[in-house]
Amino acid sequence: MAYREDISNITIGDAGSGASLITDRDSWNFTLISNTHSDSMEVSRTIRWICTATPLSIIGLVVNTFAILSIKFISGQLNSVHILMIHLAVSDILGAIICSLVAVLEVAQHINKDFYSICFHNIITLMHIFIYTLCTLTLLAVTLFRFITIRFPMAACKCLEVSKGLMAIAAIWLFSLAICMPGVVSLWNSERDCFLKGWTLLTMKYLHQIWRVLIICIILVIVGLYVWVYREARRCRIRINNLQVGKKIEESYKALKTTMILTCTLVIAIIPTFIYFLVTHYKEVPNSFPRDIIENLPLLNFISDPIIYGFRTKDVRNGFKKLIRHCCRCRQTFRTRGSTFSMTNMTVYSKAPTWLSKSSTCDLPVDLDGQRPRQSQYPNEEKLRLSNDHD
């Protein structure tokens, strides 16, 4: 564990546990954290934070899992855009997990300090950066594929191959890891207890701000591509409708509009966070500020993503209906098997000998002691014995 008893000498960047890096106080101008800080307002905010983040994370996991299964149940062969949508759902699942871990980190920092670790703090920060970069680059890849399909209709078949989608996912992961790699290298030396010094501090200082600028630039590229396609589509609407591939272009244009809506939800989720950390970098925010609401906004984005493209994409809707029918069919099969098993037991019971039934026992005479005589196992032998006694 990288936990130190003299935590009063530790400083934190941006005054936020979810997206800041623990460093030395003498290395950079950070805000001081006090070990004795146990204000009731901080504790109540932390409890509210974890109580809100936990159910939202579970909902995000369930919704995105259903989205992945719905895409897998799409009729026909999957294409590169479907693969990227699956990757977006996986990224949303990872994002929901990271947001819940940020809430756990807040609980460890303000309520249960025995579980707090500087290494854990910095790792969560780097994973936070990694997930945001992953989601944004996935949306950029979907936009580029749709743009190529609309701009170059003849190259749509090659662009929609599954191999192209897998190559795009590999490039997204490599680029996201490259963004976080300097921070990962700085955590390998356990002798410093994950403190950042020297060139690692300087690298992470700029990296911690550059990744936000990078995400904003990617969002601007997505918006620019959408505006360009929108203008071209309006200008060439009549010509597109007369082409043989006009229907596919219209579907790609609608899918690009869906990607634009997903980008807008991402912007709504992360812009308040960016503004908050930009303000807290220069001035201190009072403890009464509801930072948990800003930190939980990305969870709403992770939940809304599969709902948006599931509602607007016909293939995903059909896949979801097929998934529901498959689940109902499995349930009906289970019920049918259960009823068949019960009918088999009833048939076996109905074929039992009549002399084992309760009615045959009730007709027997009662002895003076109130006991019924034991019925013989062989009825024919009993009848023969009675006839011999009569003779």
Image: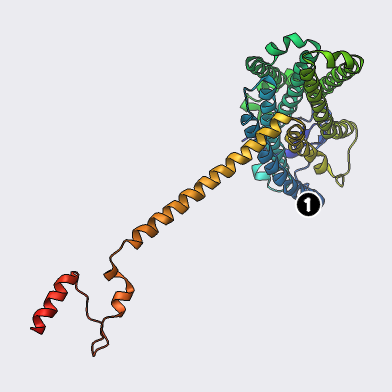
Q: Which residue is mark 1?
A: 44
Q: Residue furthest bottom?
A: 368
**Which residue lies at the image location 46% right of the left edge and 49% below the top edge?**
337
| Residue shown at the point (19%, 69%) measured from the top left | 377
Q: Quadrant of residue 188?
A: top right
Q: Quadrant of the N terminus?
A: top right
Count the numbered circles shown. Answer: 1
Name the quadrant containing residue 162. top right
Label 1: few (<14), some (14–19) or many (≥20) C-alpha neighbours in 10 Å = few
Percent of width and height locating residue 140: 77, 20
In-image side of 375 versus 326 (left or right) = left
Q: Identify the image quadrant of residue 105.
A: top right
Instruction: Give whichever of 83, 129 is nearer the camera.
Output: 83
Between residue 124 and residue 70, name the one nearer to us.
Answer: 70
Q: Is residue 356 left or right of residue 262?
A: left
Whether residue 241 is visible to the viewer of this picture, yes or no, is yes
Residue visible at 63% across and 41% down in the picture: 324
Q: Does 374 appear above or below 237?
A: below
Quadrant for the C terminus, please. Answer: bottom left
Residue type for callout 1: Ser
x and y percent of residue 2 in the render?
64, 34
Q: Secondary structure at mark 1?
A: helix
